[in-house]
């Protein structure tokens, strides 16, 4: 069994936590594949090969998105962050009207224990 991906003793990790590790590792691998295909498609001088590599890159993007969606459905805090930060306009990560409120929430969240699902 592959245990090198865990930073805590595996016997302390429940199945939900292991599944989250599995999908995070998978998302990481999908984006690595995206990067490799993207580099290759931009490096080649062969137009036909570029088309194949672009197709493969775009399929890896779909796989990555599917993994992110699974993780979003199983990690409510990620769902909240994605809803707040994706598909916005203007400077990234800048939320004028919510900054005070966000700090208060962050401090309160420090005492959160296990992820609730
Ligand atoms: Fe993939």
Image: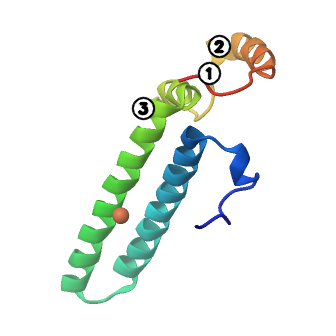
Q: Tags 2 and 1 in contact by the CB under 8 Å rule? A: yes
- Say if disc 1 is inside 8 Å of ligand 1: no
Horizontally, residue 55 falls left or right of residue 109, namely left
How many marks do you count on the picture?
3
Horizontally, residue 4 falls left or right of residue 108, namely left
- Say if disc 2 is inside 8 Å of ligand 1: no
Residue 86 seen in the figure: no
Q: State the image coordinates of residue 54 (x, y, percent, origin top left).
A: 28, 70
Q: Residue at x 49, y 64 (%)?
A: 29
Crowdedness near tag 3: few (<14), some (14–19) or many (≥20) residues, C-alpha within 10 Å: few
Secondary element at tag 1: loop
Crowdedness near tag 1: few (<14), some (14–19) or many (≥20) residues, C-alpha within 10 Å: few
Secondary element at tag 2: helix
Residue 45 seen in the figure: yes
Q: Residue at x 28, y 61 (%)?
A: 59
Q: Which of the two labelled residues, at mark 3 and mark 1, occupies the earlier sequence position?
A: 3
Secondary element at tag 3: loop
Q: Residue at x 43, y 31 (%)?
A: 73
Q: Residue at x 48, y 55 (%)?
A: 27
Horizontally, residue 21 falls left or right of residue 55, namely right
42 lies above or below 28:
below
Residue position for label 3: 87
Residue position for label 1: 95
Q: State the image coordinates of residue 61 (x, y, percent, origin top left).
A: 36, 57
Q: Identify which residue, 16 or 35, lies in the foreground.
A: 16
103 lies above or below 114:
above
Residue position for label 2: 98
Q: Identify which residue, 98 or 30, lies in the foreground.
A: 30
Q: State the image coordinates of residue 103 (x, y, percent, origin top left).
A: 76, 17
Q: CA distance from mark 3 to mark 1?
A: 13 Å
């Amino acid at each position: 069994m592959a245990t090198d991906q865990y930073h805590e003793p595996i016997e302390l990790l429940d199945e939900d936590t292991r599944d989250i590790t599995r999908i995070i590792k998978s998302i990481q691998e999908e984006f690595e594949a995206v990067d490799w295909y993207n580099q290759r498609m931009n490096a080649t001088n062969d137009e036909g090969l570029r088309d194949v590599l672009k197709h493969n890159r775009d399929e890896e993007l779909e796989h990555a998105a599917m993994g992110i969606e699974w993780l979003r459905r199983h990690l409510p805090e990620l769902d909240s962050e994605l809803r707040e930060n994706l598909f916005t306009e203007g400077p990234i990560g800048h939320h004028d009207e919510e900054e005070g409120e966000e700090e208060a929430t962050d401090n309160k969240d420090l005492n959160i224990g296990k992820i609730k699902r």
